[in-house]
Each structure stands twice: as C-alpha cells, then as structure tokens.
Image (tube, rainbow, N blue to C red):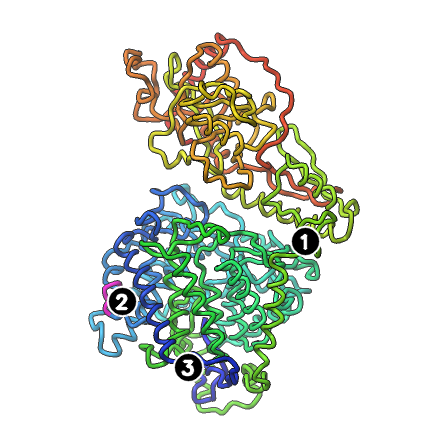
Amino acid sequence: MWGLWMLPSATMLHSFLLLLLIGTFIRLSEPMTREEKNKLRNQVLEMFDHAYHNYMDHAYPADELMPLTCRGRVRGLEPSRGDIDDALGKFSLTLIDTLDTLALLNKTAEFEEAVRRVVTDVRLDNDIVVSVFETNIRVLGGLLGGHSMAVMLKDSGQMLWYQDELLHMARDLGLRLLPAFNTSSGLPYPRVNLRHGVRGPETRTGTETETCTACAGTIILEFAALSRFTGDPTFEAHARRALDFLWEKRQRNSNLVGTTINIHSGEWVRRDSGVGAGIDSYYEYLMKAYILLGDDQFLQRFNTHYASIMKYISQPPLLLDVHIHKPLLPARSWMDSLLAFFPGLQVLKGDIRPAIETHEMLYQVTKKHNFLPEAFTTDFRVHWAQHPLRPEFAESTYFLYKATKDPYYLEVGRTILENLNRFARVPCGFAAMKDVRTGSHEDRMDSFFLAEMFKYLFLLFAEEEDLPFNVEDYVFTTEAHLLPLSLSTASNSPLSLVINNMAGEELDDANFEWTCPNTRLLFPDPAFPRNLREPIRSAVDKSCPRPAAIREPGMGHPPLRAQDFMANNPEHLELLRRMGVSLIHLKDGRVQLVQHATQAVSDVAAEDGMRFMQEMMELSSQQQKEQLPPRAVQIVSHPFFGRVVLTAGPAQFGLDLSKSSSGVRGFVTVAEPYNGCSELSNAEIVAGRIALLQRGQCMFAEKARHIQKAGAIGGIVIDDNEGSSSDTVPLFQMAGDGRNNEEVILPLLFLFHKEGNILLEALKEYREVEVLLSDKARDRDGAEEEDCSTEEKDNSSPASSEPLNQSKVTTQEQVAEDSVAGQESVQPAEGLGSYVPVDVGEEPAGDRDSNSQSGDSLMAEWQEDLEAFKQMEKDEL
C-alpha cells in the first residue's frame, strides 16, 4: 500500500501522482540521528540477505524455505498443512515474490540474476491445485512487480536484454486463473488447477461453493495492471465484475459485507464482519483501485464501507467483528493479527487519529508478547499463539511515520528488527513462531516475509537518496508489489476518453473534496499524538495480565480459558457452574457444553461464560481443521502376518508416526492399572513393549507419561464405550492436558472399542502379539518375521508392492472421510443457549462390558476380510 494521497492539479490529473501530506508533527521526543537510521537500514539489508541467500542456497527452486531443517518445502513431499499449502504451486514462489524487493533494496545484480532464473526455470503449467487469491497476489503480483522494475531499469540503461519476458509469464498465468471466474455471479472459485482449470475430474477442484470476501475482492489491482500492460481488457473486466457483485450483496442497512459468500447464489455464508482475516484486503483494494485507476466509483464505495466500519466495528483502539444484520452485536471477543494493516489504510484515507490509536494498541500487545499473536482478546491476552512473521504491523508503522515524521515510529521499527533477530532468527533464515508465549519455532518462512517485511522496514529507515526510484510513482499491492501509477493512462483504460477530454481544463474546488487533510491543521498541538498514545499504553498495561479482582467469576480466579479447560478438573467444573455453563456426557464419550446466562452467579460471570463458549467454539473449529490423518495398528505376528490392520486415531503429542519411516514395532501387554492413571505396577513387564490402556479417568497425556516412565515404547488407548467403531464414529486426535507435552516422546494411538477388542482377543488367544504402529499399513511381506518367511506368498494378496487396507471396519472411502473428521461441528442447540460438543481429551470411564467374540469367530471374519482385501487396488490410510 502506498501513500498519503491528494488529488493532483489539472496538469497532473492523468498520471494520478498523488502527493504526500506535507504536514509533520513538531516532535517532543528526540529525533533519531541520520547515523542511527543508516545503521538500522544496513541491519535491514543484512537480515534480508540472511533470509534470501538461505532460501537460494537451501531451498530454491522449491516454493519456500524450511529454516529449521534447512531445506525447501515441496508440496506433496512434506506432510500436508491443509489450506496453507494452496499457496504452493511448484513455481519457485519465494523467488517470484521477492523480485521487486531486490530492486527496491538496490540489489540490481541479484535482481537481474533472479529474473533470468524465473524466466529460465519456472513453469506455470503444473498439474496442481492452487489458491486463486494467493496465486494472484503473490505470483501474478510478483511477476508484474518484477516487470515494472525491469522496465524501470531498462529505461535507465540497464538490463537492455529484457524483452517483457516476465509480462508474458504474467499473461500466461492470468489466462490460467481465468477459468476460476466462470461462475454465474462472476465471483471466482477459490481454487484452480493450473493445467486443467476447474471443470472435469482431472482438475480435482471446482466443487467448492463458497469463498472469502477478500479472496474474491482482492483481484482488481493485479488484473487491471495485467490488462493495461498487455492491452487485453478481459482480466480487468472479470475483476470489476467480481467487485460489482460483492458491492451489490452488501447488507444494505449496515453497508457491511460478510466474511464468506456462496459463489453461485451470492448468499452470505458467514455473516460476521470486520477488517481482519477474510475481508481485510477487499477494503484495501477499493481504495487502491481508485488510486491506481482513477475511478471515483471505487472511492465512493470505500467511503460508504469506511463510514460503517467507523460506526460499528471501530471501538478505539479496538476493531471488533460484528454481525452484518445486527451490527451493534459483537460477533467475537478477540481480534486477529491481519487487522494490523488497517491503521496504514486509515493513513491512506487521511484519518490519522484512529490510526494512531489502533497502532499504539497493537504496539503495546507486541511489546507484551514480542510479536503480534495470530489472535488476541479484547483484554490483550493470547488467543491464538502462532506468529508466521506477518508484515502488516511493520506496514502500518511505515505509513504512520510517512504521515507524521514522528521519530516514535522509528523506535517502533527498531523494536520489530530487534525482536526478529532475537527470537525468530535461526542459522538458515527466520522461522515463524509456533507459540509467542514459549518462543518455540515452526519450520516455515513464508514468501511474504521477503516480499513485504523488508520492503517496509527498509523504506522506514532509508533516506530519499537511498532509493533507486521514486516510490511515490507506484502503488503497493496487498503483497507490497509495485505497480506504476502511470497505468491509469494506459490506452485500454475505461477512463482514457474522459481524461483526454479533460486535458488542459482547470479543476474546480469541488474536486478537492477527496483531498486528505493536512496534519498541521489536524493536530495543531505538537503533544497531541503522544496524548493519544498514553491512555492506550496504560490500558494495555493494566489489562494484561488482567487482575483477578476485576474479572473473576465469583471465586477469586481469572476467567477460565477454553484452551486450559479439563473436564476432570473439579475446580474447572465449579468455574463452569458459576458461569452458567453445564456439562453433559454423551454416549460416544464426548462432552456437550450448554450455557444459561441466567444461571450464572453474576453478570460478570455470565459474560465470562459467554466468552468461554465463544472460545470453545473457535477452538473446536480450529482443531477440526488441524485433524491429522488416521494411523495404523498392524498385527504382524503369527498367525496374522500383517493381514489385520486396525484404524487408529493419532495424538497431538508424542512421536509423530508420519515422520517415522519404520514406525514402532513391539509386543503388546496390558498395563496395570488398565486405565494407566497412576504409576504401573507391572512396569517390569511393560518395559520395552507397547502398553494397552483403557480410556477414562484421566487425561491421555497422563497415561502416556505413566507408561513412558515404565519403559514402554508405545501405547494404545482402547475406548471404553461398548460398540464404538471407526466405521460409525469419527476419528479424533487425543488432546494434551495443558502441561508441557513435549516430554512425551513415545507414540500413542487410539482404538475404538470394536477394533480394540480385536487386539485384546488376539492377545487372549495367542498370549504374544506383535504389532506395528505406523502412519499407514506396511507391505505384508515386509511385516513378517524371518522365521515366517516360508508362509505361502499366494496368501498375501494384494501384491507386495501395494500396502494393505486397514481393517475389517473401515473402507477406503471411509478413511478419506475420517482423515478430516474429528470433533463434531459446532452449532447452536435450539432452546439451549450456547451449545458446544467437544472432545476434551478424556472423560470418566463408564462400565465396560467384556463380552467378546471367540478366536474362531474372529479368524473367520479375518478370512472374509482377506478376500475383500484382494479386491482393493490401493490403501490410502
């Protein structure tokens, strides 16, 4: 994003070179010396080199760098991360995203070499499904930004060999994205296959029915630039049609838009509205489309939305989501970190006061946690603890400094630099924070870190003479790619006729209704910005940590948080009662939470209960998205030899079997006590074996600690709910207990009652039973012991090159479903107030019926399964 813009005089109308606000604050704080700024600028350059060179040395041509393991992230070769991986298209994402950063940072030789690599090495016709939104802003935007820089350098006598190769690649990519727009509404499908489009089975996409507002509304800058660079109006027309549809579907009373929308019917799927994730760059692109294209319609729409944002969502310094039909009703009690871009957009709008206030709140939260948590509550506590090195806060810091020249924002920038170096820097780059509270890392360095973070930090500390070109001639996209403002006068511009007719005419004063205010007049008191910041700083200091006496639910304790809740903790149950929340045990072992606000001990406790229920719904939804694929318990000893494979649920802690090439193999034995909730009395027998445990009476992680202490090499928890089976009950991940679960290093798997009973009967029949715990069934021949090698190979169908299907109770199709199933979806219960079905890690055990099938009956069933296995072509656990 760029600038503090004013409409120019008539002689400059057609270039739309919008001027920076000329006013500056008289500063009370000590200005930073030029020497200090230069030192920080050089530090930015060194940090960029550290990140970029490690990507090129250890990851290229992969899409992204994995900085903890010093290798590239190649989609399909690493465990899937879900939707995050839709940004990866095997097109050297980080290099393309970094092109114009190299140019801006005066790294001309490296930029030229990078362009040559992209032109020579990158393919865009891969048979891979990618996000339309991410591919547009990162790859198409990166190619266009790189093209803009290459043209600028060529015009200055450098890179004379360049013949618009990046632009040709951009047009090719644009054509590959266009099939996504083939909907009745004009809203694009969220994903597209780069080779096959969205229609047909080979595309593996095109069945989606909804997309986020930002996903459909963040297209216009890149597509319009592509149209104006190439002279083909098709791209801009599709982007305008999508924006027009979103505008028509706004809620007419509140003038707000929802978060997700049905791409066919135009119905809002999620009706919560804010300025963060899911909507953010839709508003940004309305303003910037006006700046880049000069179409007043975009500004009018933005102003309409902005007035509603300030009326309903803005509660300075907070920005809280509301319901579009009931905008006075808050939709959640937390904020996500993506809204940190909004103060920068307010600077662009010229609304400086709320920008200062919100930015200061974000800065204080940053100082509390070193980084902005992915989400934080209204009392500034961590809600989601991750931080993937997002640049939005640095972006707003830069724009506020440009607007005010207040050295305070240079000190904010210094803090960002120091925290990145102290907490995120690793030998092979910069690693995302897995948890800002503990400082643990995640093995990822997203491409936007190089594309955006270093641009804004460099611009913050650079002097005008440090820049290779005038950045005021460009607009920054949401990915900080540089598009020249001269595109507004391109020959295919819909405004070109109007512009030509106005040439030479003087503007009357009415045109300056769009002008941003001068900060000299806005803030005549030089102490005013500081006076705005002080109360916010004090508010954050007082609210985090929140004093128990202010917000306790009647017991002298701070409110219970969803992520800390344990259903077997008496103190937690008492806190729930006082908040008006009751707990119901379901037959399948899950827990249902119901809140009646009238049953709370006080209004404060009822409010805390409402917050707890909202957090629990968000946590349940988040955990559902993070489901791991099912695991396998394969019986490999005589007489099974790997023919019996039981579908098992994974744990969120302990050894990750998906990262173990051989799995864990050992003989099983029943733990004593069977529930594993205290130290084992048969530790000498369990040592070196895989322990069998019964679900119930304590947390899963506690069971794991006890068997690990006894020397077990693995554990299998068997459900105590009679008759439960993976063919009727969705698999789930066993949750931790809120303590340090990293100390658990053995694998723990979960079997439902029916599958667990098979294993127990086998143990009863044969006394010594060996199993393999793994991420998927191994080839049967490979699972056999050497002394069993004389077993007839004809009995081991399917062919040894194919893995087995998993069990008698799960089909191949069901596994695909189970791999994304976990907790039941969260929904309100009629007449019950807030309702959340959740799995809380463990519940008290019920009575267990030990009735079981005979060994002969089980063997007969296994033989039937063996025949079924022979018909299966493939196992996709």
**On residue 548, which mark appears?**
1
Of tags 2 and 1, which is closer to the observer? Answer: 1
Image coordinates of residue 558 in percent, x first then y, are 66, 50
Question: Which labelled disc corresponds to residue 111?
Answer: 2
Front label number (3 vs 2): 2
Kind of residue sitting beneath label 3: Ser
Looking at the image, is mark 3 or mark 1 nearer the viewer? 1
Secondary structure of residue under mark 3: helix
The percent position of residue 588, horizontal first and vertical second, equals 62, 29
- Quadrant assignment, res 770: top left
The residue under label 3 is 15
Q: Is residue 10 above or below residue 836?
A: below
Q: What element carries label 2?
A: helix
Quadrant, the C terminus: top left
Q: In which quarter of the view is residue 624 placed?
A: top right
Residue 237 visible from this viewpoint: no
Q: What element carries label 1?
A: helix
Q: Who's the residue at 47% across and 14% down the image? A: 763
Name the residue type under label 2.
Answer: Phe
| Mark 3 and mark 1 residues within 8 Å of each other at the beta carbon | no
Crowdedness near tag 1: few (<14), some (14–19) or many (≥20) residues, C-alpha within 10 Å: some
- First of labels 3, 1 by sequence position: 3
